[in-house]
Image (spheres, rainbow, N blue to C red):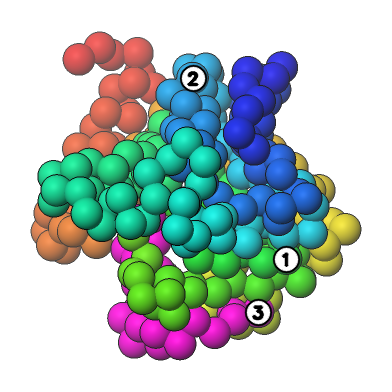
Amino acid sequence: MTLLDKDGVRLAVDGAVATVTLSNPAKRNVQSPALWRALTEAGRILPGDVRVVVLRAEGKSFSAGLDKQAFSPGGIDGELSFADLAHASDETLDEAIAGFQEAFVWWRRPDLISIAAVQGHAIGAGFQLALAADVRVCADDVQFAMRETSLGLVPDLTGTHPLVAILGYSRALEICATGRYVHASEAERTGLANLVVPAAELDGAVADLSAALLGAPRNAVVETKALLQGAVGHTYEEQCAAERAAQTRRLRDLAGIGE
């Protein structure tokens, strides 16, 4: 069932699995504020029984990043140009970027597990969108690159936190500062990719992983995801306490004992 199809984004739901597709292959799924608004809307209208969200893209490239028209004097039609944003107040500029970031944050909701199926180029905003997902399954032709610094900008679409969490500070800095390509073998070796498969097998691998993720009871997966997300910010003792609290809730739930 298709729930959304606009601005280069299509959302379809099949039972507990939702699929968000970047659907502008002719332009290599370049990104724009309109696309980000559509992605945000997709997150807001997900049915409550969805447990797994797959993020995929049509064509040879996952996403070539921000639409280059954004860098032109007139910007993207109907949107504030970079020049407009630069001359706006701090509050207006902060609000605008926060609005853009909304498209990237909902993928990590505790009640969902998100899988990015990534093929070809995932550049800049495309790289950050792939990083927004919990898990990345990549085709063997994948090429990640963070090109913002070469444009005089910084990665501001929520990508820096997961990049450092996955790679560590030094490698994340080197990748961002040089803008170099990270190919499939390095992505798999360093943990950027959970799995690398031949391009022809990408959809099948994602379907298999989705089915496996649905195997465990939902509440157990939700609690486990929340524990893992909180682990980095906790001391060892705090994490032990969080585990005890979560297990108490699970045991009582399994025994049919209410709060």
Does residue 111 appear left or right of residue 77 in this picture? Answer: left
Badge 3 element:
strand
Highlighted magenta segment, given as a residue range: 157-183
Amino acid tagged 2: Ile
Query: Image height check: is 19 above or below 101?
Result: above
Residue at 34% over, 87% down? 170
Between 85 and 172, the residue placed more toward the observer is 85
Is there any visible trace of residue 36 in the rendered image? no
Q: Is residue 159 magenta?
A: yes
Quadrant housing the C terminus: top left
For disc 3, the marked residue is: 183
What is the crowding at mark 1: few (fewer than 14 residues within 10 Å), some, or many (at least 20)? Answer: many
Q: Disc 3 or 1, which lies upstream in sequence?
A: 1
Does residue 127 appear left or right of residue 176 in this picture? Answer: right
Q: Disc 2 or 3, which lies upstream in sequence?
A: 2
Is there any visible trace of residue 97 in the rendered image? yes
Point out the frontmost of discs 3 and 1: 1
- Position in image of residue 1 (x %, y %): 71, 17
Q: Is residue 181 magenta?
A: yes
Q: Mark number for residue 120? A: 1
Residue at 61% over, 44% down? 55
- Position in image of residue 258 (x %, y %): 25, 12
Please, which residue is most extreme toward the right here? 200
For disc 2, the marked residue is: 45
Amino acid tagged 1: Gly
**Magenta part mainly helix, strand or loop?**
helix
